[in-house]
Amino acid sequence: KNEVEQSPQNLTAQEGEFITINCSYSVGISALHWLQQHPGGGIVSLFMLSSGKKKHGRLIATINIQEKHSSLHITASHPRDSAVYICAVSLNYGGSQGNLIFGKGTKLSVKP
Amino acid sequence: DSGVTQTPKHLITATGQRVTLRCSPRSGDLSVYWYQQSLDQGLQFLIQYYNGEERAKGNILERFSAQQFPDLHSELNLSSLELGDSALYFCASSPEGWANTGELFFGEGSRLTVL
């Protein structure tokens, strides 16, 4: 069993829909990251969470430490949101938080 | 543009050969991380350097090595290449005190094809 599990693996949505991507992990962590990888391959860091909730534009990320679960929500989805969204967890406190265990990613396609 | 530069963008080589991938971090970032993304394994953390010193090691093969130079750029050396080393190699940098900001800045990656 992978230490970081994402669901769904693939997601197709219509423009404007509300989207949720889930991430569950089985280890104690210091932080959880959500990353976005575009079709060209480049990776962008979206959020780092250690508790609670963060919002940036139409993106919202939440984490429940007790349940070892995080969600990434996209409101009013748009075709430009089409990408692979990757959840990753850090086991280290301070100094090596890029030492990550990655989920396999969720491929999102938003149709106009 | 993340400010992190990786070269080369694409590299094709043969089994048994040795290659060097280069990463220039964002100005002022002391930490450099290397990752491998392959079709079967997904993304994996390889190694971290902080201000010239190795700080953390992940799933890095013995045939691979890295270093960080005084100007903070880093190189990942891959030797005795095998077909299975074909992958996208990313580096990322983070600023000192990164634990407070939480952000990693990724390069565009170097795509290695071993034939």
Image (cartoon, coloured by chain):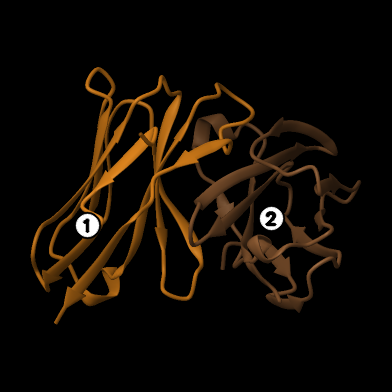
Chain colours: A orange, B brown
Residue at 25% x, 65% y: name it: A108
Residue at 70% x, 41% y: name it: B47
Q: Which residue lies furthest to the right in this view?
A: B70
State the residue position of label 2.
Answer: B26
Q: In this view, does A5 lie above or below A11?
A: above
- Measured as percent of width and height from the top left, residue B109 is found at 62, 66
Image quarter (top left, top right, bottom left or bottom right) of the C terminus of chain B: bottom right
Residue at 28% x, 25% y: name it: A68
- Amino acid tagged 2: Arg
Can marks 2 and 1 be said to lie on one chain? no
Q: Is residue A69 left or right of residue A84?
A: left
Q: Is residue A96 left or right of residue A44?
A: right
Image quarter (top left, top right, bottom left or bottom right) of the N terminus of chain B: bottom right
State the residue position of label 1.
Answer: A58
- Measured as percent of width and height from the top left, residue A85 is found at 34, 56
- Measured as percent of width and height from the top left, residue B13 is found at 78, 76
Q: Callout 1: helix, strand or loop?
A: loop
Cα–Cα span, label 2 and label 1? 27 Å
Q: Quadrant of residue A65?
A: top left
Q: Is residue A78 above or below residue A49?
A: below
- Measured as percent of width and height from the top left, residue A95 is found at 64, 28
Are the residues tagged 2 and 1 within 8 Å (C-beta)? no
Q: In this view, does B48 lie to the left or right of B45?
A: right
Q: Residues within 10 Å of mark 2 (few under 14, many from 20)?
A: many
> Residue B27: which numbered mark, if any?
none
Q: Callout 2: helix, strand or loop?
A: loop
